[in-house]
Amino acid sequence: MADESSATPFGRYPTTRLRRNRHSDWSRRLVAEASLSVDDLIWPVFICEGAGAGEPIDSMPGVVRYSLDRLVERVAAARDLGIPAVALFPATDPAKKSPTGDEATNPDNLICRAVRAVKKSVDGIGILCDVALDPYTSHGHDGLLEDGVILNDETIEVLCRQAIVQAAAGCDVIAPSDMMDGRVGAIRRALDEAGYTHVQIMAYAAKYASAFYGPFRDAVGSAANLGQGDKRTYQMNPANSDEALREVALDIAEGADMVMVKPGLPYLDIVSRVATTFAVPTFAYQVSGEYAMLAGAAERGWLDRERVVLEGLLAFKRAGAAGVLTYFAVEAARLLHDRA
């Protein structure tokens, strides 16, 4: 574009000055291309057995596992801040883990009891539950393991039963995070046949085999089970972008109501491509490793915590995300209210 300029006593200066729109707060707000609100936030919450418990997670400064009584209090507070939904993740008693993850389909497992407790006491907030076996398997994988191989179709049969017990407990959104091929369609059929046609599916459609998940595995207690193993045979290669579009297209065709990209900030290009290509509600998960980096740096005074929290979340919106799963959700909601 040609440089527009005009003569002045001091020489030639540009007539088009983009800084004019940045001069005042009101003007910056008026021309902002993306915006972040409390409506964009989903709060992932870790839960544990017991009462009155708030167990700190060392690798996630400021994040704790809540017992069910504390969970109800915290979810009510999140609801009062306007947060639309929470995502619940259980820290399963190691004694209840097995090679086949049978506890996942127990209608009285920790996650199902948590859903019932929240639904009984807190109105006006959605509950999202993961469908995957890693919190329940003694080997730490998301599916059934046989001779070192994750079994796809056999795992899906278990996932369908897991989705049914969660829906029966009152879960609003089933979120398959296992990355088995064909699981969204199978879960949709299972839910419909069981009468849960109203239950939504948010598919972890583009979930990468990322190094950013470490603190999460500490939080749910699967790190020790997985050991030196990895999930590269079923989670996506971080090198791939076009493949993410194929994964998302399949999940939409199989009945997903919403899709997710995970991790978040290192994969903003994937968020943007998915949102632009499919024009479906696209969510991003700001995962535990992302949280730990920002929170840890802020603890040491290396970053301004409030500013980086909101700037990071705004980046998701700029990329095209409909919303973000973030451990900063409650903090961000308070900051947004304070700035309103």
Image (cartoon, rainbow, N blue to C red):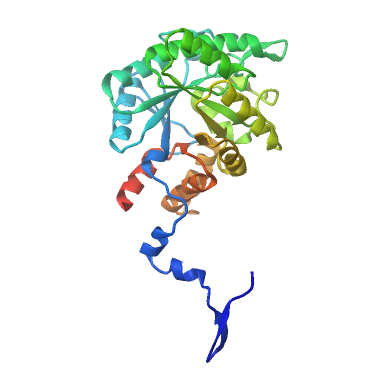
Q: Is residue 194 above or below residue 38?
A: above
Residue for point 59% across, 37% down:
274
Residue 61 spot, x, y in % from top left:
45, 39
Q: Position of residue 261 (x, y in %)?
A: 57, 34
Residue furthest out toward the bottom: 9
Residue drawn at the location 26% of the way across and 21% of the way down: 121
The quadrant the N terminus occupies is: bottom right
- Pick the front one: 163 or 331: 163
Answer left or right for 144 relative to 300. Answer: right
Q: Does residue 297 appear left or right of residue 26 in this picture?
A: right
Can residue 171 be spotted in the picture?
Answer: yes
Q: Quadrant of residue 88?
A: top left
Q: Which image quadrant for residue 278?
A: top right
- Front residue of 142/63: it is 142
Residue at 52% across / 37% down in the picture? 284
- Which residue shows up at 56% across the image and 81% down it? 13
The one of 332 and 192 positioned closer to us in this rendering: 192
Give x and y (percent) for residue 57: 46, 32
Of the pair 233 and 274, the residue shown nearer to us: 274
Residue 280 lies, with reference to residue 50, above or below; the image says below
Q: Specify whether residue 299 is in view.
A: no
